[in-house]
Image (tube, helix red, strand yellow):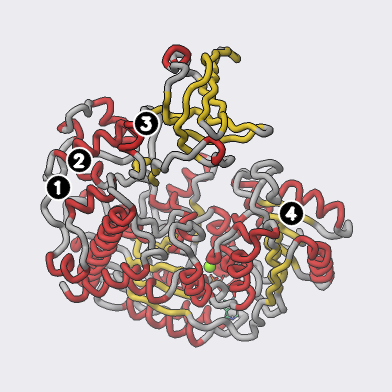
Amino acid sequence: MLHRPLTEIKGVGEKTAALFAKVGVTDIASLLHYYPRTFSVFEEVTSADRVTDGRTVSVNCIVTGNPSVRHVRGKSIVTARCGDESGNLSLIWFNAPWLRSGLKPGRRYVFRGLAKKKGNAFTLQQPAMFTPEEYASLAGSMQPVYPLTKGLTNAVVMKSIRKALDLNCYTEETLPEEILSAEGFTGIREALFGIHFPKNEGDYLAARNRLAFEEFYDFIRKLRALKEENDLAPNAFPCIETADTARLIEALPYRLTAAQHRVWEEIKTDLEGAHQMNRLVQGDVGSGKTIVAFLSLLMTAANGYQGAIMAPTAVLAAQHFENFRALSERHGLPVRPVLLTGSMSAKDRREALAGIADGAYNVIVGTHALFQEGVAYRRLALVITDEQHRFGVRQRDALQEKAKIAADDADSRSRTIAERHAPHILSMSATPIPRTLAIILYGDLHVSLLDEAPAKRLPVKNAVVNTAYREKARQLIVKEVRAGHQAYVICPMIEPGEMEGLTNVTEYAEELREILPAEIRIGVLHGQMKAKEKDRVMEEFAAHLTDVLVSTTVVEVGVDVPNATVMMIEDAQRFGLAQLHQLRGRVGRGEAQSYCIFTDTSPEAERGEINERLAVMKESNDGFKIAEEDLKTRGPGELFGLRQSGALAFRIADIYRDADLLTRAAAWADRTE
Ligand code: ADP
Ligand code: MG
């Protein structure tokens, strides 16, 4: 009933519908769930002398004198003055020449706009105008502000949603009555009104709570159904253990940890078993996930199948590829790896695709390019996603689906999912979210924990410092480099001036080249470099041809250079805790003592709360503990860490802010099964 075309709404024609499609609104249902980004509240009117700089204000004033019009570079600028008993204000509008005659001197209006101070006087910019009566009826109300696209105005979205609500085609309740009454949630009808046109904040929060709950509830139930379905799927690629894996484990320069052994046994049992594998390996940074992934790929390759591993960045994919190639050459393993990313030359790509299609390669390493159009596999038995959390929970089933289709030959499309040759799925993640939430959000997977750091690892030593300490930090870098080690310096920006006051890799590297002794070799890495260039810089650092790598967060996930012992993060207050933990995870990967320096460059006044967050980093090296702290310290509506990378994004729910709703939704999903 809800999947009715937008054009059924009065006033929405093909053209408007096409604009809506651009923001993902394709029918009435999706329009009703197109939530406001924020609200603008029509505040009470203030007097002219109570206006504050940089604030949107409403004043009830009389226009004094005639408005004037100027033209600057083809644009008209209307200025006027107004005032009340307490003082005067200037008004300014761009490109609104009709105002010259529309503004009547001596008449009273409510002007609402952004106040800017110039000298001792205030100007309201582009103020909206109301009659005092009009404004009185609006004051205190919340006006929704929607995400827009070019051509689609807020007024059109508002009007369309109002009309859609009037169609009354959404009244059928979507949550069980039992939940509604026990939780005290509002019904779907009130919720939809409240989310778009709340009478007050309480109204909005009630609507939001209910809709966020519902989003979690639906998601969890879908995961459970998925798990049930997956658990029945037959093992289309049964494996038997060959001598290769045991031989490799024997020959490694280190002993696997007990946790690695246990997890590897669990995977092996899956691959040999009766059903398709759907497993998540969760382990903190540096716990040794890569070798477990490689063992799994080796097992499928030794059984005559293909396996693929997908990494979130090309830098990480290239590193895995080099690593796997070296391992298979050194140990004479039946692994023939190939790299497939989006930035390959046409010739390399053609060669890679041909080799994948005819089975010349049996381990395919890449980015999301692995599942793009035109990639045909031959007996793809295993799909691994590394740093799975970077791909987002909600993308997970889409990805599996793609993997299934990719594994299919064309004429099997008509078969049901269960009959298709679904590959085994293995996800690797440092999952920087609290364990309690992880259990719910990954409810469709079997979870293996890598809860043990390799032996001989010393915990990273942490320091939170201000800029006065930079000199000392640089001395530490020099000392470590002279002892044969390497260092990372992370800056948030690439070039000067991108964001005022923040350090950038370009200038920072120049500066280091001047300050540090000449024998120290410095590399520069950032996301906007060409792929080949990035690979070269990364390889040089890995091969110890450079000593210090000045980089943006492109090295955040997965990069493994065990010889690096210093991580210095500039403007550390800019990053979320999860991200800082990942960055720090780039050191402490070998046996030597490592150091992580968090440089806080925030102004003194803002320190308090920032210090609290960075103190968490200083006190703990445990990713799960940091995630718990993150959950506690995060205020409503803050968007640090995961949300920044777009992972775990729900439409309205937020796993941090709404952790409590998530737990309750999970409990209800248990009860109503
Ligand atoms: P992550 O879990 O972060 O992906 P990696 O798999 O990259 O960690 O491993 C980090 C480093 O530890 C690598 O250099 C790897 O060779 C090494 N490593 C892995 N397992 C062990 C082990 N059992 N003992 C010693 N070093 C190990
Ligand atoms: Mg890794």
Q: Secondary structure at mark 2?
A: helix
Q: Nearer the viewer, mark 1 or mark 4?
A: 1
Q: Nearer the viewer, mark 1 or mark 2?
A: 1
Q: Amino acid at mark 1?
A: Tyr
Is ligand 2 less than 8 Å from the beta carbon at label 1? no
Q: Is residue 311 above or below residue 241?
A: above
Q: Secondary structure at mark 3?
A: helix
439 or 291, which is in the foreground? 439
Q: Nearer the viewer, mark 2 or mark 4?
A: 2
Q: Position of residue 150 (x, y in %)?
A: 40, 30
* Labelled disc at residue 523: 4
Residue 458 left/right relative to 407: right
Q: Quadrant of residue 610?
A: bottom right
Residue 405 left/right relative to 229: right
Q: Amino acid at mark 2?
A: Ile
298 or 468, which is in the foreground? 468
Asked if the residue at tag 2 contacts the one at tag 1, i.e. Cβ–Cβ closer than 8 Å, the answer is yes
- Separation (CA) of disc 1 from disc 4: 58 Å
Q: Position of residue 141 (x, y in %)?
A: 33, 44
On the image, numbered disc 1 is attached to which residue? 170
Q: Amino acid at mark 4?
A: Gly
On the image, numbered disc 3 is attached to which residue? 132
Let me know if residue 77 appears in the view: yes
Q: Quadrant of residue 39?
A: top left
Q: Amino acid at mark 3?
A: Pro
- Separation (CA) of disc 1 from disc 2: 9 Å
Residue for point 69% across, 77% down: 461
Q: Position of residue 608 (x, y in %)?
A: 63, 66
On the image, numbered disc 2 is attached to which residue? 28
- Separation (CA) of disc 2 from disc 4: 53 Å
Please identify the quadrant where the N terminus is shown.
Answer: top left
